[in-house]
Amino acid sequence: MSVSVAELAKMIDHSLLQPTLTDEELEHGLRLALDYNVATVCIKPYYLARAAHVLQQSTVAPSTTIGFPHGGHTTAVKVAEARQALQDGAKELDMVVNIGKVLSGDWAYVREDIAAVVEVAHGTGAIVKVIFENC
């Protein structure tokens, strides 16, 4: 199987989440994402509206995190984060699963937590990806 550079780029979610990134570095990251035409840019929530504006004429989807970095937020907080992100232009949400609940085997909690965010996101056609943040 052969994959072109353009096809490979569309498989990449470009992450701009490092806590020390400046606004200038975020802008550079957005330009880089546009130059390579990646699938998404996952950016810090406070910069999402700006990213959505910059990316609006492209096929690069703006994305952000929910419950980042450890997934320990309550479900209500995650839902509020999701609503704000969607309002700010997110087309995809990377939701951090509550790892403590996963390790405890509390699958009912995990399922309900994910379902609440998915319900909000799917109401706008947004994609939700559940991630394990292990740092």
Image (cartoon, rainbow, N blue to C red):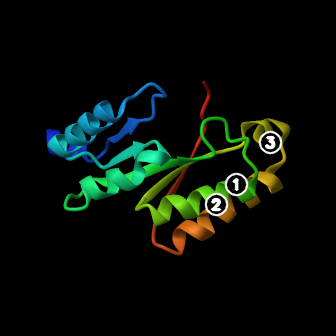
List x then y, in percent, for residue 114. 67, 57
Q: Is residue 83 left or right of residue 91?
A: right
Q: Quadrant of the N terminus?
A: top left
Q: Give me the disc on residue 80.
A: 2
- Residue shown at 61% from the left, 37% from the top: 132
Badge 2: residue crowd in 10 Å (few <14, some 14–19, many ≥20): some
Label 1 belongs to which residue? 77
Residue 10 appears left or right of 16: left
10 Å neighbourhood of mark 3: few (<14), some, or many (≥20)? some
Q: Secondary structure at mark 2?
A: helix
Task: Specify whether residue 110 is in view.
Answer: yes
Mark with earlier residue (1, 3):
1
Give the numbered dot on residue 53: none
Which residue is depicted at the point 60% across and 64% down? 118
Q: Are marks 3 and 2 in contact (CB under 8 Å)?
A: no
Q: Amino acid at mark 1?
A: Val
Q: Residues within 10 Å of mark 1 (few under 14, many from 20)?
A: some
Going by the image, does 48 lie left or right of 114? left
Q: Viewed as shown, does residue 112 lie left or right of 97?
A: right
- In the image, is residue 83 above or below residue 6? below
Q: Give the residue pinned by disc 3.
A: 101
Q: Which residue is painted at 41% across and 44% down in the image?
A: 42
Spatial CA distance of label 1 from label 3 is 16 Å
**Mark 3 → mark 2, Cα distance in angstroms:** 20 Å
Q: Secondary structure beneath disc 1? A: helix
Front-lying residue, 106 or 80: 80
Image quadrant where one finds the C terminus:
top right
132 or 26: which is nearer to us?
26
